[in-house]
Structure formats: structure tokens, C-alpha cells
Image (cartoon, rainbow, N blue to C red):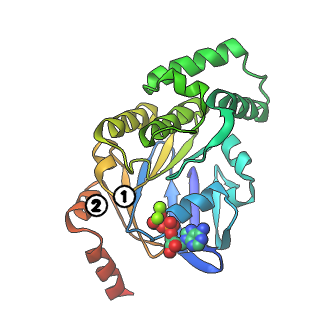
Amino acid sequence: MSLLSIQNLHAQVEDAEILHGLSLEINPGEVHAIMGPNGSGKSTLGNVLAGRDDYEVTEGSVTFKGEDLLEMAPEERTREGLFLAFQYPVELPGVSTMQFLRTAVNSIREHRGEAEMPVGEFLKLMKDKAEYVNLDYKLVQRAVNEGFSGGEKKRAEIFQMAILDPQLAILDETDSGLDIDALRVVSDGINKLRDANRSFVLITHYQRLLEYVEPDFVHVLVDGRIVRSGGKELALELEEKGYDWIKKETAAVA
Ligand code: ADP
Ligand code: MG
Ligand code: MG
């Protein structure tokens, strides 16, 4: 059984249909890249999977571990092992990353019928993971993302992911606006967390991140549909030729 199964997904925002029948299967341990021109619906897909308001599914289905994802509230999705990192991460003024993650971790444990994590164990986990992903521990004590630089936000996301230990992580444009050092930190973090059970969806406009995190599959999203899927060589082809050729080719067969 696949981990995530998306079938014929149609979704709209403010009465305009953006996704026009998107299908995708993700198995445990696989890294999928979703590439596509601006405005093709990449973030819309992420938002639908996150269960954000304003995104209405009008047709199709999404199952996660065999269960109907679309029926789950956003927090429930997190508890079930889905992690989403966004292009524009939210700030939570007045809530430290430490508090935020402690609540999240304990909610996941409660869901699994486990007791709260003892404070000492939690602090050790925070320290270990901060070191693991190269995050300055001071950031952990500050309000979530408040006043963080672009690079710090991305590191903090990878850190959150390391703590929450999801089965499927979806990262939307996590590489955008990163300098080369920050890009390395982010991709090292992803590579370290990559294993036979954890899957990733890397949403990205550019091929750059994929030079550091080698995807198993690359999908090209154009006008709300996946128009082509292939291996990592497809990303290189896109980098070389841009998106226009694939748009023209798709228009020709449509
Ligand atoms: P991408 O991430 O591939 O650049 P998006 O999913 O952000 O594309 O956007 C796809 C289309 O949906 C665009 O035409 C965009 O204007 C529209 N769209 C996305 N989110 C909203 C929204 N909240 N309100 C109105 N239109 C939206
Ligand atoms: Mg966009
Ligand atoms: Mg986007």
C-alpha cells in the first residue's frame, strides 16, 4: 500500500479551479520532486494536503496510510505523521519554538497512547537535534520564526521536522532565497532524515536543491496537472531547456 495516494484531485480557490485532476502515488522511503512554472498549482497542492481553509476539493481523493486525509483536521494530519513546511513560514509571536514543539510532541504521543515526554528527555532531544541540523540553540528559545532571517527559518523548519519525526514531509520551496551555505544545511538535514520509511515531497521551481538532495522521481506540474514524470534526469532537462518546451508539448497533445 502506498503511503500517500492522490487520485484525480480537483481543487479550487475562491471558485477558480486550480488543480484539474492530479494523481500521485508515494511509497515509503521515496523522495519525489514536484517542479513546475510559477502559478502551476504547486503550493495549492501543498495547501490542500495541509488542509488549509480556502482550498476546496471538488473531486478526487487523497489517502494517507490508507485513511482519508481530506477528512482529517490539520492537527490530525500532523499527528498521523504528515509534516508540511511552507514557502512563507508562519510566525507565532510570544510562543517559543521550544513550547510549540513540546505541545506538538506530546500531542503526537497522546495520540499514540504514550505518556508525556519527561522534561529532561525533551530538552535532550532538542539539544541533540539542534546539533544534528546545525541550528543555533538560541533560536529554539525565541518565538517561532519571529525576526528569523530567511535562512534561519529554513533551518528551523528542518529542526522541527527532525523533532516531529514525520513519515511524510512536504517542503514547499524550502530552497527559495537561500544562499549556498544555507542550502547545504537544509539539504544535509533532509539527507540525514532520509531513510527507508520516511518519504519526502520536495516542491521546487528550480533544479538547485535537487543537486544536493537526489530525488527518486521528478514530476512536472503544468496548469494543475502532472504532465510528465521521470527520474532525476528530468530535473536536469528542465534546468537546461526551461519550462516552455514542456508547456508547448503538452498543449500540442491536449
Ligand atoms: P505555484 O506554487 O506553482 O507558483 P500556486 O499554487 O501558488 O502556484 O498558484 C496557482 C494559481 O492559484 C495561481 O493562479 C494563483 O494566483 C492561484 N491562487 C493560489 N492561492 C490562491 C488564493 N489563496 N487566492 C486566490 N488565488 C490563489
Ligand atoms: Mg507561487
Ligand atoms: Mg508556490
Query: In the picture provided, is 59 more to the left or to the right than 224?
Result: right
Q: Position of residue 133 (x, y in %)?
A: 44, 27
Assign a secondary structure to mark 1: strand
Q: On the image, which quarter does residue 35 sit in?
A: bottom left
Q: What is the quadrant of the C terminus in the image?
A: bottom left
Q: Which residue is mark 2?
A: 234
Q: Is residue 19 visible?
A: yes
Does residue 14 lie above or below 87 as drawn?
A: below
Dot 2 amino acid type:
Leu
Callouts 2 and 1 close, C-beta under 8 Å? yes
Residue found at the far front of this picture: 147
Q: Is residue 8 visible?
A: no
- Viewer-closest of 223 and 4: 223
Query: In the picture provided, is 55 more to the left or to the right than 211?
Result: right
Query: How many C-alpha atoms fall within 10 Å of the one at disc 1: few (<14), some, or many (≥20)?
Result: many
Q: Which mark is residue 218?
A: 1
Q: Position of residue 223 (x, y in %)?
A: 45, 76
Could you give the CA–CA distance between mark 2 and mark 1, rounded to whole angstroms? 6 Å
